[in-house]
Amino acid sequence: MTSTDEGMRAFWRGRRVLLTGHTGFKGAWLALWLRELGAEVTGYALAPRTGHNAWESLRMPVRSIIADVRDGARLRAALAETAPQIVLHLAAQALVRESYRDPLETFGTNVMGTATLLEACRDLPGLQALLVVTSDKVYENREEGRPFEESDRLGGRDPYSNSKACAELVTQCFRDSFFAGRASVATARAGNVIGGGDWSTDRVVPDCVRALAAGRPVVLRYPQAVRPWQHVLEPLGGYLALAQALVDTPAAAPRAMNFGPDPAAFRTVSELVQTFSAAFGGRPGWVADGAAHPPEARALTLASTLAKEALGWRPRLSFEESIDWTAAWYRAHAAGDDMAEFTARQIAAYRARAGARP
């Protein structure tokens, strides 16, 4: 491994980490990566919501607390028991269409869940950094066709996007009101993430996998919508780097940061489906859903200049490589492979890629 990877390993080895949302798609990958780095990880989340899920596929030997992030008493008890040095907050209601079906649950989890965590952490002894993960959808989207920067106005028309923008404001408020001179607090905003182990409903890659298995076309709501597609390991590497910067250089580390792919990975939903289908080994095609659906943004892209300048972070996988790695994971899962080992190999390959210069 390169000196960059050695430095990351040295930082995280033995460090106590509380990871909320560890049973989710991104959370499960991050828990495994942290374990590979030698961190002492405690997960705090609800049980997985789908039969297939990344958490159970990876079978990780980390302490797992199954509880609601809105349960302040249980959360404070977990923090007292584990005494984390770093808290990574990924627990969320993460689906746009689900937010239309149940907006109160979405706001409750994403806003009050974040507030409950921040409140529980503000007098926590030994806490060095707290990173709240929100979304690329936190920005007020006027469909101007330019990548969003961290200084752009927050907004969000649908309940999910709005709840994540609210979580940004809640985090800023708690940071300014209660964490000054204590732990460093920041937010991270990532683009549309793909990768193995996502089985959520109303997400395009899981929909592709199910359609390919059934030999039928994928039904798309907005086939021409443009999104900043990136492999799950890309933003996770950014989260780890930002959390480390919050501890090592607290005065200089940014308090909000985008982690998005190269502009070449800004593709339409239909392009993603076609590329994934070919990589997976089938071409069922896609059809447009003729039903009426709640509105979603036509185009959504991020600028990651700040991450590059402040952290030296940049995306390492092309759009095609991200698709290939994702398709390979699902093919291995279908073949009955050991997915903990397979996922660890992908993490190792990415770490080697990310540690390369420049």
Image (tube, helix red, strand yellow):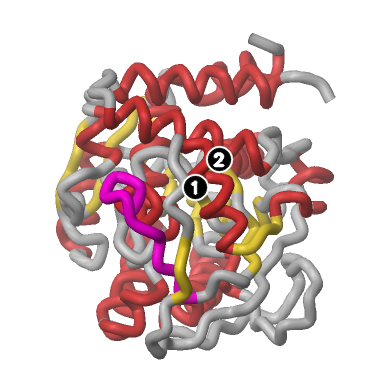
Left or right? Give the position of 175 relative to 309.
left
Region in magenta = 211-221
Residue 76 locus on image (x, y percent):
23, 55
Which residue type carries mark 1? Ile
Q: Amino acid at mark 2?
A: Ile
Instruction: Using the rendered image of the protein, determine whether residue 45 is visible from the camera's viewpoint.
Output: yes
Please tell me whether residue 47 is drawn above or below residue 222 in the rendered image: above
Label 1 and label 2: CA atoms lie apart by 8 Å
Q: Looking at the figure, which quarter contains the N terminus?
A: top right
Could you tell me residue 80's position as x and y percent?
A: 24, 45
Question: Please, what secondary structure does the residue beneath circle 2 have?
Answer: helix
Can you give x and y, in whole percent of width and height, for residue 42 in the image? 28, 36
The residue tagged 1 is: 194
- Name above or below for residue 340 compared with residue 131: above
Per the image, the residue denoted by label 2 is 323
**In what quadrant of the picture does the C terminus appear?**
top right
Q: Is residue 42 left or right of residue 296?
A: left
Q: Is residue 107 above or below residue 240?
A: below
Q: Earlier in the sequence, mark 1 or mark 2?
A: 1
The residue sitting at 41% across, 20% down in the picture is: 344
Horizontal and vertical percent for residue 23? Answer: 27, 45
- CB contact under 8 Å: marks 1 and 2: yes
Q: Is residue 211 found left or right of 76 in the rendered image?
A: right
Q: Tag 2: Cα neighbours inside 10 Å, few (<14), some, or many (≥20)?
A: many
As for residue 215 lying within the magenta part, the answer is yes
Q: Which sits in the foreground, 352 or 65?
A: 352
* Residue density around tag 1, few if under 14, some if 14–19, many if 20 or more, within 10 Å: many
Per the image, label 1 sits on a secondary structure element best described as: strand
Label 1 vs label 2, nearer the camera: 2
Q: Nearer the viewer, residue 331 or 52?
A: 331
**For the point 47% across and 47% down, which residue is it?**
283
Magenta stretch: includes residue 228: no
